[in-house]
Image (cartoon, helix red, strand yellow):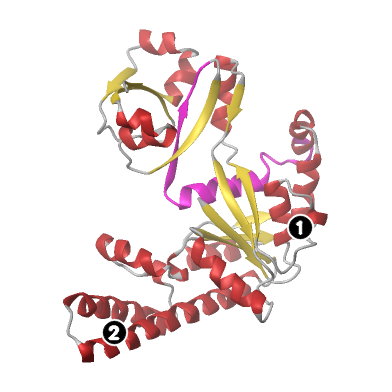
Amino acid sequence: MKVAILGHSFAGQQQLFSILSGIPLESVRQKPLEAQPGVCAVRDPRVARLVPLYNPEKTVYATIDYTLLPDFDAEGPAKRLIFEELKKVDELCWVTRAGDAENDMRRFFAELIIADLLLVEKRLEDIAKNQKKKFSDAREKEQSLMELCRRPLEAEHCLARHAFTDAQRRELRAYQFLTLKPVITVINCAEGHTADAPELARLRDLSGIPAIRMNADLEEEISRLPEDERGEFMHGMGIEEPAVDRMTRIAFESLGYITFFTVGEDEVRAWAVRKNSPAVEAAEAVHTDIARGFIRVEVIKYADLVAAGSEAGVKEQGKWYLKGKEYVVEDGDVLCFRFSV
């Protein structure tokens, strides 16, 4: 899972990236014209509930790879770098300031739409040239698909909001259209200011994903506190959880991923898998050998395990299941794979 973080100058994207990645802000600011990679754990609160049941030697969260891009209002090589990097990621995180967030978002989408429209026009031009040399059913099919894309783009609409068939969406992946990618909006609110509910609703209408309010300075202060002091500090501030944790989970879910868990005294671990994935694909996420030698998978629902307090308690209640490779993994499943290689 790869997510690009970007915004206009002074929107707070560098600070957000520093909080997520753990890379000092001073180091981040030394490379303003580069694409900077970082990794962030998806802080799923269910992991913390599972740990006391097993007291594992190690706890591992699912992760997201973030890339911080240069300021979006940069020009020249930096601007070209931004658009090249945007093609490589699965999702975009747009950071903006409260007050003008909606107009800022619309300007951002307008540039993405132009980039996609230029790509469509270039493909149609190439197809027309090649069709004169030799007729091809494949090129005719591509031409129809590109013309289908051109209509919403010319109407200044993102492709993500267009009703493509599943087959068409699979074909479109190869083109790396920017307006097909999910976009999370982070509104960086200064202390004493906030984004109102109507503005948040309009931003959700624009991107299709809930916008996240955040005070980057406060989030940075929370991130610098020792783990055992954060809860008390946030309680005093009336904060249930850091906004960056909520943002990371939304990024995870909007990409179509769910979480399953493997548990034991050695390790409690969260794994990422696409929604509607069969058990054998979840096994492959853990290790290819497990998928290759898959026999069965033991399934316990997270809620059942926490309520019972132990695997033995779950079995006593008759809520332990043995499934085959076609079982569709559900969010929160606790899995133990049986395999032989």
Relative to 318, residue 58 above or below: below
Residue 113 location (% of width, % of height): 48, 78
Which residues are the magenta region? 235-264
Relative to 107, residue 265 above or below: above
Relative to 21, residue 90 above or below: below
Q: Residues within 10 Å of mark 1 (few under 14, many from 20)?
A: some
Q: Is residue 239 magenta?
A: yes
Residue at 31%, 31% (x, y): give it.
292
Which one is in front, 107 or 26? 26
Which one is in front, 107 or 102? 107
Rendered image quadrant of residue 68: bottom right
Amino acid found under the numbered disc labelled 1: Val
Relative to 261, residue 152 above or below: below
The residue wearing badge 1 is 28
Rendered image quadrant of residue 56: top right
Residue at 30%, 26% (x, y): give it.
293
Dot 2: element: helix
**Taking 203 as reference, is 315 left or right?**
left
Q: Is residue 213 visible?
A: yes
The residue wearing badge 2 is 127
Q: Is residue 155 visible?
A: no
> Mark 1 to mark 2: distance in Å?
43 Å
Q: Earlier in the sequence, mark 1 or mark 2?
A: 1
Residue 296 location (% of width, % of height): 29, 22
Rendered image quadrant of residue 95: bottom right
Amino acid found under the numbered disc labelled 2: Ile
